[in-house]
C-alpha cells in the first residue's frame, strides 16, 4: 500500500511512498534494539554535542522545513518557521539540562548509602499526529535520546515528508542511524510493534480513541505509555478582565494552527455582564485574520489538514445548531469536500449538543455565558477533557485561586496556553496521562532504580547552636 503526501490547499497528491512491510519494519526494530545497548552508555557530553548539532540544523533548514509543512498539512510558512525554531530551542534545552535532570539522587535511609539512579529503558515507540509535525516529535525525541533511549517514529500517514526530514536531521547531527528511525507503516503494524518485547514503551499524541486502543494493547503487554489526547480548553473571562486584550488573545488562541491544536482555546466562558461586548470584540479580531496560500508570508491561517476534517467539523456545527446553538459569526466551508474552513462563533451551546461535549478541532469558537465566577468554573470543568485552560481577570490573586480549581494539566492566568520546554505538559481525565517536557518529561521513560549500599548509615551531623 502507498502512503500519500497530500496538499490540502491545492487538493493534489504531492508524493507517494511505499509503505514498509513487516519484514522491513522488524529489521529496523532489530537495529534499534541493538544500538540501544551501546547508546545508553555514551557520555552525556557526546549526546549533548549531537543534540546541539540537531538544533543548529533545524535553524539552518527552517525555511525548507516550513515549506514541507505548508505543502503537506497547510501550515502557513511563518508559523512553520516558528515551530522549527521552538524545536531547536527544545533540543538545546535538553542538551544543556539532561545530565542534571538524570543525575543520581541521594536518599536518606538506614543504608550506608542509597540513591535513585535514572537509567534508559531502550526502544521507545512514538505515535505522532500531523498538526505539529516537527514539534510533537521533537518534544519526545530530544529527551528520549538525551536519556540514552532510542526512538522509532510512526508519524501520521499524511506527513511522511516531515517524518523523513526529521530523521535526516538527527542522522546528520551525528546520532547513530538506528537510534532514530521514521517508520512509514500502515496502522496494522503498530500493534505488532507494541507486542514486540524489544519495544519498551510507547508515547502517543492523538485522539481519545487512538489513545484508548494503544493503552489497552500496551497494558496487555505490560508496557509504559504516555498519552496526550484531545482537549476542549476553557478560556474563562471574568467581568473585571481587560476585555480588549482578552478578546485579542482569544482570537489568537482559537486560531492556533487554523484551530487544529489540542491546547487551542475552544470554549469561551464569559461572565454575563460582558458577554456581548466580548463576542463583538472576538468577532472583529477573527474577521481580520487573513487566509490564503500557506506558502504566502502574509497568510495567517491556512486550510485544515484534510477535506474530511473540514466535513466533520461542519457536521458538528450543523448538528449543534439544529439542537439549539446560535451562529454569531458565520464562516465554515464554502462547499463539502474542501479543506478551507473560515472562523465561526457559536453561542447558546448546551448539554447534549455535540459542540458541548465533543472537541471541535478547527476554527470554531464556542461562547458560553456564566452568571458568576463559580458558575464559570463549573462550566469549565463540565468536560471529559482536561488539557489546558485560561482565566482572565485584573485580580491576579483571584485568578490564581480560580486556576487551582480548573481541572486540567495547565492553567494560564491572563495569558494564552502554550507549551515550552521548561514547563511540564500533559492532561487529566480523557486528555491523557503522563507528562512531556521539563524534567518530568525526561523521567517518564527511564528506569527509576533504587540502589542500596549495605552497611551502617553515617551519623547525622548535629546542629551547632
Image (cartoon, rainbow, N blue to C red):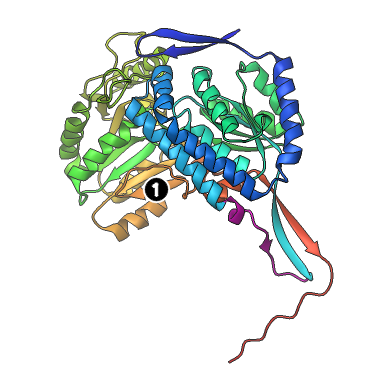
Q: Is residue 407 shown left or right of residue 164?
A: left
Q: Position of residue 27 (x, y in %)?
A: 74, 21
Q: Is residue 325 shown left or right of residue 316?
A: left
What residue occupies the far right of the structure in this picture? 455
Q: Looking at the rendering, which quadrant does residue 388 occupy?
A: top left
Q: Is residue 322 above or below residue 384?
A: above
Q: Is residue 440 above or below residue 291?
A: below
Q: Quadrant of the C terminus?
A: bottom right
The answer to whether residue 433 is visible is no
Q: On the image, numbered disc 1 is attached to which residue?
A: 411
> Is residue 104 found inside the magenta-colored segment of the image?
yes
Who's the residue at 16% across and 31% down the image?
284
Who's the residue at 37% across and 35% down the image?
82
Q: Position of residue 220 (x, y in %)?
A: 72, 31
Front residue of 282 and 92 = 92
Q: Looking at the rendering, which quadrant does residue 213 occupy?
A: top right
> Is residue 97 found inside the magenta-colored segment of the image?
no
For numbered disc 1, what is the local secondary structure? strand
Q: Is residue 376 above or below residue 123?
A: below
Who's the residue at 27% across and 38% down the image?
250
Per the rendered image, the range of residues in magenta is 98-110
What residue occupies the far bottom of the structure in this picture? 465
The answer to whether residue 451 is visible is yes
Q: Position of residue 238 (x, y in %)?
A: 25, 48
Q: Quadrant of the N terminus?
A: top right
Tally of marks: 1
Amino acid at each position: 500500500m502507498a502512503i500519500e503526501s497530500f496538499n490540502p490547499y491545492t487538493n493534489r497528491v504531492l508524493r507517494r511512498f511505499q509503505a514498509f512491510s513487516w519484514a522491513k519494519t522488524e529489521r529496523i526494530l532489530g537495529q534499534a534494539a541493538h544500538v540501544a545497548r551501546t547508546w545508553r552508555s555514551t557520555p552525556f557530553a557526546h549526546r549533548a554535542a549531537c543534540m546541539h548539532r540537531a538544533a543548529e540544523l533545524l535553524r539552518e533548514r527552517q525555511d525548507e522545513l516550513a515549506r514541507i509543512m505548508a505543502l503537506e498539512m497547510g501550515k502557513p510558512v511563518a508559523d512553520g518557521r516558528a515551530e522549527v525554531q521552538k524545536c531547536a530551542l527544545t533540543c538545546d534545552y535538553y542538551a544543556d539540562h539532561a545530565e542534571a535532570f538524570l543525575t543520581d539522587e541521594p536518599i536518606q535511609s538506614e543504608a550506608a548509602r542509597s540513591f535513585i539512579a535514572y537509567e534508559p529503558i531502550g526502544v521507545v515507540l512514538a505515535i505522532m499526529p500531523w498538526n505539529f509535525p516537527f514539534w510533537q516529535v521533537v518534544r519526545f525525541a530530544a529527551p528520549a535520546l538525551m536519556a540514552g533511549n532510542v526512538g522509532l517514529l510512526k508519524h501520521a500517514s499524511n506527513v511522511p515528508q516531515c517524518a523523513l526530514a526529521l530523521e535526516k536531521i538527527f542522522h546528520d547531527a551525528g546520532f547513530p542511524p538506528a537510534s532514530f528511525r521514521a517508520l512509514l507503516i500502515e496502522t496494522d503494524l503498530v500493534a505488532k510493534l507494541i507486542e514486540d518485547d524489544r519495544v519498551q514503551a510507547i508515547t502517543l499524541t492523538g485522539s481519545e480513541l487512538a489513545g484508548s486502543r494503544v493503552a489497552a494493547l500496551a497494558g496487555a503487554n505490560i508496557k509504559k505509555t504516555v498519552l496526550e489526547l484531545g482537549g476542549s480548553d476553557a478560556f474563562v473571562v471574568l467581568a473585571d478582565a481587560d476585555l480588549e486584550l482578552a478578546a485579542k488573545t482569544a482570537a489568537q488562541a482559537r486560531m492556533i494552527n487554523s484551530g487544529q491544536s489540542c491546547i487551542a482555546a475552544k470554549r469561551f466562558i464569559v461572565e454575563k455582564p460582558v458577554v456581548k461586548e466580548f463576542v463583538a470584540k472576538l468577532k472583529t479580531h477573527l474577521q481580520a485574520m487573513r487566509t490564503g496560500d500557506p506558502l504566502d508570508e502574509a497568510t495567517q491561517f491556512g486550510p485544515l489538514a484534510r477535506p474530511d476534517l473540514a466535513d466533520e467539523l461542519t457536521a458538528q456545527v450543523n448538528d449543534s445548531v439544529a439542537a439549539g446553538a446560535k451562529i454569531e459569526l458565520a464562516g465554515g466551508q464554502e462547499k463539502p469536500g474542501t479543506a478551507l474552513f473560515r472562523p465561526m462563533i457559536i453561542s447558546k451551546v448546551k448539554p447534549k449538543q455535540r459542540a458541548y461535549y465533543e472537541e471541535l478541532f478547527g476554527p470554531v469558537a464556542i461562547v458560553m455565558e456564566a452568571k458568576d465566577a463559580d458558575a464559570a468554573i463549573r462550566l469549565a470543568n463540565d468536560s471529559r477533557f482536561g488539557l489546558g485552560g485560561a482565566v482572565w481577570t485584573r485580580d491576579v490573586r483571584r485568578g490564581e485561586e480560580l486556576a487551582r480549581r480548573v481541572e486540567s494539566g495547565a492553567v494560564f492566568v491572563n495569558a494564552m496556553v502554550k507549551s515550552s520546554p521548561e514547563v511540564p505538559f500533559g492532561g487529566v481525565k480523557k486528555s491523557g496521562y503522563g507528562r512531556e517536557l521539563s524534567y518530568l518529561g525526561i523521567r517518564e521513560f527511564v528506569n527509576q532504580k533504587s540502589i542500596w549500599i549495605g552497611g551502617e548509615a553515617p551519623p547525622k551531623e548535629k546542629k551547632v547552636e
